[in-house]
Amino acid sequence: ATGSNVWARSYDRAVSDIFAVQDDITQTIAGAIEPELSRAERERARVRHRESMDGWSIYQRGMAHLYRYTRDDLATARQIFAEAIALDPDLGPAYSALAEAYYYEVVYGFADSADDNRERAVEAAARAVELDRDDAGAHCTLGRIRYLRREYTAAIAELEIALDLNPNLALAHYGLGAAFVFSGKPREALPHLESAIRLSPHDPNMGSFLVRMAEAKYFVGDDEAAVRFALRSLSQPAFQWSRYAIMIAALGQLGRSAEAQAYIAEVARSRPTFSVSFVRTMHPFSRDMGIDRYYEGLRKAGVPENAPVDAAQARPT
């Protein structure tokens, strides 16, 4: 309506195979433009008068809160998504977004009961899929919640459906990569995580993209690369304790425990219960995948086995 520029980018490629170049650029544009348009849509909803909003606009307002990833914003997002659903009970994306809010409360450690959040998340995500089985985003959300519940086979199946429906969906590539990391298949995770980063370089989930890359690199034995990706993930907005955990583990394996102390102190300020036991409980790794090396790295860096008694009563912020 305004003629304003929403998204633009230039590309520089060798033209040895013009068809490969065309495919590459087409896929990159298709993957990158959706997050940019979604960002513009959230901003449009934010400045509209609330009384003039339909369910879709209310949903977009909730998305603006969702992507701030704070305790208060996620709680607000859940309330807004519930409002959108009340106004339009068949609005599938609102159910997906509600599931995402429950998901992020678990991921960031804000949930009063992680088990309750997982249950509510899977119910909302399953409803979104039921409303529109051709919605790649709905399958993507359900798949990511499945691995949060350590249901890896079901997670991989849903995420593969999402990519069949939309091969350029960066979050689905990320989700499939994460499912492979968490289920003990880091080499299979790498190409999907690389695709997610390439397809959506300004994605609001970039911190998660990068931390999963760090974990995949760590589990294939490339500790130096794990540190590089962990450092990049830590430069992204929002606090995510797993970014610190993999950085600390990789530094521990590299014999850089003195350097790791600063990261241990920093994560403990926001997560006073941070410990080897905390990571083992909170991270959705398969209990059968043989991740002793991860905990070994944390111990080498100086992470305590269990949280201090006084910290165990602290509420995360």
Image (cartoon, rainbow, N blue to C red):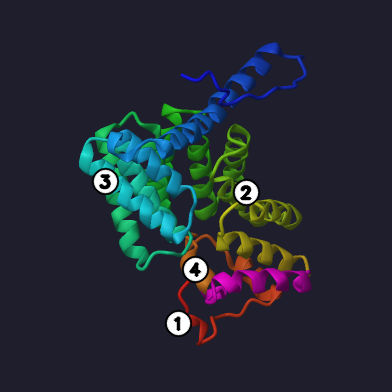
Q: Dominant secondary structure of the magenta stretch?
A: helix
Residue beneath disc 3: 83
Q: How crowded is mark 1: few (under 14 residues within 10 Å), some or many (20 or more)?
A: few
Residue 182 painted magenta? no
Up the image or down, 78 lies above or below 297; here it is above
Contact (Cβ within 8 Å) of mark 2 with mark 4: no
Residue beneath disc 1: 313
Disc 3 residue type (three-letter): Glu
Residue 261 painted magenta? yes
Question: Where does residue 79 sit, x and y in percent of width and height?
Answer: 31, 52
Report the residue at 52% width, 60% height from top.
Answer: 289
Instruction: Say which element carries label 1.
Output: helix
Instruction: Say which element carries label 4.
Output: loop
Question: Where does residue 96 sit, x and y in percent of width and height?
Answer: 34, 42
Residue beneath disc 2: 210
Foreground mark, 1 or 2, reads 1
| Frontmost residue, 204 versus 289 | 204
Disc 4 residue type (three-letter): Thr
Of marks 4 and 3, which one's residue comes earlier in the chain?
3
Q: Distance between the residues labelled 4 and 1?
A: 13 Å
Up the image or down, 136 lies above or below 19; here it is below
Q: Which mark is residue 317?
A: 4
Residue 102 visible within the image:
no
Residue 275, quarter of picture: bottom right
- Which residues lie in the magenta part? 256-277
